[in-house]
Amino acid sequence: MFAKHNYSMLRQAWPLLALLFAGGAQALPKIHNWTTAGGTKVLFVAAHELPMLDVRVVFDAGSARDGTLGGVAALTNSMLGKGAAGQNADDIAAGFEQRGAQFGSGSERDMAWLSLRSLSDSKLLDPALELFANVLSRPDFPAADFKRERQLTLTGLEYQQQQPKSIAENAFYKAVYGQHPYAANPDGTPKTVAALTVKDLEAFYHRYYVAANATLVIVGDIDRKRAEAIADTLAGALAPGRKAPALPEVAALKAASTEFIEHPSSQSHVLMGAPGLRRGDPDYFALYVGNHVLGGSGLVSRISEEIREKRGLSYSAYSYFIPMMRKGPFTLGFQTRTDKRDEALSVLRETVKKFVANGPTDKELQASKDNIIGGFPLAVASNSKITEYLAMIGFYDLPLDYLSTFTGKVKAVTVAQIRDAFRRRVHVDDMATVIVGAKAPGDTDS
Amino acid sequence: MRGWLALAVSLFTVASYAAQPVHEFTLDNGLKLIVKEDHRAPVMVSQVWYKVGSSYEHDGITGLSHVLEHMMFKGTKAHPAGQFSQIIAENGGRENAFTSRDYTAYFQTMEAARLPVSFELEADRMRNLALPEEEFKKEVQVVMEERRMRTDDDPQSLTYEQFNAAAYASSPYRIPTIGWMGDLQSMQVGDLRAWYDKWYAPDNATVVVVGDVDPQAVYGLAKKYFAPLKPSHIAPLKPRHEIKQFGPKRLVVKAPAKLPYLLMGYKAPVALNAEQDWEPYALEVLASVLDGGDSARLSSRLVRGSAVAASVGAGYDAFDRKETLFLLSGIPANGHTLDDLNKALQAQIRDVQETPVSAPELARVKAQIKADKIYEQDSIFYQAMQIGMLETVGLSWKDADQYLSRIEAVSAEQVQAVAKKYLIDDRLTVAELLPQPFDPKHPPREGGVAGNVR
């Protein structure tokens, strides 16, 4: 939630490129990989240039595990820094911050994680790691903090209701995923959140925050031996437990749907899409590279060219796949003033249809490959980015050579493969469309 | 600085993390070049900063700097519209541009060997922009959509814009960077031409390169591409100081929303204009005592503790170009009013005025800033941003290096002194967002222009 006033006006929205690409010919980090006695997968990269360390523990404990308790995954995650081993939220926050350490946590549909960034000086690192281990493995779920955090979640849901973008996203997932766990808002609904109890959180924690269900990522200024010791301490503090069961498959959409949600905004926010890609999908490279041409490469992509550059209809028009454990969404979207909504929507549909029918030109494909491959070194140019990639590789069980084989696989994609994959996988006439905004002049009362 | 490179050559030791030196050059035409080496990865970021932004504008032409930034991608004679972005993309680059009150900046992040591609294109558009009328007509529509998305349809942003325009009377900081909708609607391509000719010149630009580069080689490239450009000899800026405020200002914003929202801003000096050198740094420490993390006072006392706030924050930037605002903002927790939150924030201000902050708090703030100086070296982009921003507001990259020692010199008494001197009613502006129901019969707001008919 919560207001940030960006003074800077960007020329373009930051494209959603994070974690969509990687891999290349140049020097890559050597990834050390092992499994702890309790069954936690560990990925470690030594990086000695800066005296700092990043640690991230990822659990298969996102909102896809909520079941009927909508919001329990998110609330469990946010409660972990609010009381542990007898220390209260103030003690924990001060314990990290007085040493210059940064503690973080978060959850999405698939994953939930805890993270620590600290200087590698052991006078600072050792106590920060000890506290991190307690937060990870000995949460207290204090009742007063629980009540407050639950209320903050409810307030956060109200905040979403005043942002047309959030309203559209929530409705979009519902329309695309129907009965699948991905359909639900990860923060829950006012009704499900209000009904949550400390017992629900404790049960969720004990089921999913366990060694067998965890991936541990360590990047920074330590050697392998020290990394092993840290892994043993952190993973060893967790109950062994068992892996979360496989999530159900996602059903394809059978027919087109359109939902209109009235909102007093000057723009209409439009999202259109369907279930798309899972991590490790055999069509991943054809669809990823193809989408780069279609709508995934910022202002030089076809969708942006047609909607923004040629017609001035929107600040941001795009398409992207979010590969997830099961098929994540293929999303197309834009925002425009309401009297231009229908024009922009028909341009979007036509652009996608034409692309699905014909695929990219040779020239477009080459340009996209040049961009992806040439930009590869940027993808792993910092400890933070490496940490994120390792978390993705570990969590989704991708091969350890994922980074080193990536550009070769991009290079091998052909126009025919893209056309074939888009024809099989992208059906514009069966997509869900969500529109949030005011009524346009021609709209009938529904 | 990826570790595997260092391991391969065994050059670095654990202690070798000291920030790389910075190299400064000036071309004969006035262009300043600053290069910082970072050899962790074979990449670099190249940024061109211009001393122009919305605080250089005046009524009637608001938003001009930002629209011009958009038009900088619409071609030169040598590289027609669209080509700039295509060339960067084909070279594996990531690019963007941003406009703020105090600067306009353009950047490309690429493989280090491709720096000439960036320099050639940036030098070309520094003096040779085409500004085609047809492209302008479309692009100004894009900017209006950007305004609708960022401001008009976001009740908190809308409140902030109104608050900001009320807080400042004569300072150009009252101008929203995105521009007023009416000014966007009446903007002409000729306005952009005049603005471009005035500000886009080598003697008003700073080029910053951070990454896996050799400073002398970068200097050579800069001479090759930028040295032929003619300077524009920009006249000194008018001071445009903020006039004295004679009492608190209050305003109410009514807009469709679900949650109320409070903004409080106290006029405060910045590093460029402070009466005492240490004051801006004491204000930075004060902002961290209040909001430097989850253990800081506002989170600990108002979100937890009394639980009067659902969210709350404090902010101050010592490196703004002009007198700025020490900002407090928040959303009352369920069951509490804007008035409750206002009173709670005032009580926190009284506390820092009456009692010196504790030694552990000061130690915590300093430990965080010390660690942040290391963490920020993980991003070449951030390092370049910091250099470019400081240079463009009229400070020096050296101020970034000295930041830590200046913060470490701040005492509890100094924090108390700036709180007493600046966080007072006569410097205060308060804005409240009063949520209005979502009424389907009420027509949507449009661009903040009263009576505008679409």
Image (tube, coloured by chain):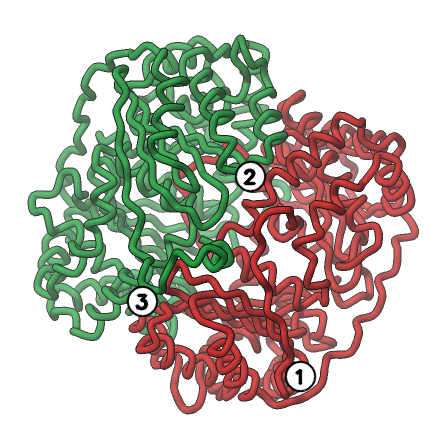
- Specify the colour of chain A: red
Q: Position of residue B275 (x, y in %)?
A: 7, 43
**In this rendering, the label closer to the viewer, 2 or 1:** 1
Residue on which the image places disc 1? A39
The residue sitting at 60% across, 83% down in the picture is A201
Rendered view: A152 above or below A296: below
Q: Position of residue B418 (x, y in %)?
A: 12, 55
Q: Is residue A342 visible?
A: no
Give the number of the disc on residue A13: 2
Q: Measure how far apart labels 1 and 3 are at the Cα level.
A: 41 Å
Viewer-proximal residue, B236 or A422? Answer: A422
Give the number of the disc on residue B122: none
Q: Position of residue A251 (x, y in %)?
A: 88, 60
- Mark 1: few, some, or many residues within 10 Å (few <14, many ≥20)? many
Q: Is residue A329 visible?
A: yes
The residue sitting at 50% across, 43% down in the picture is B42
Question: Marks 2 and 1: CB-CB under 8 Å?
Answer: no
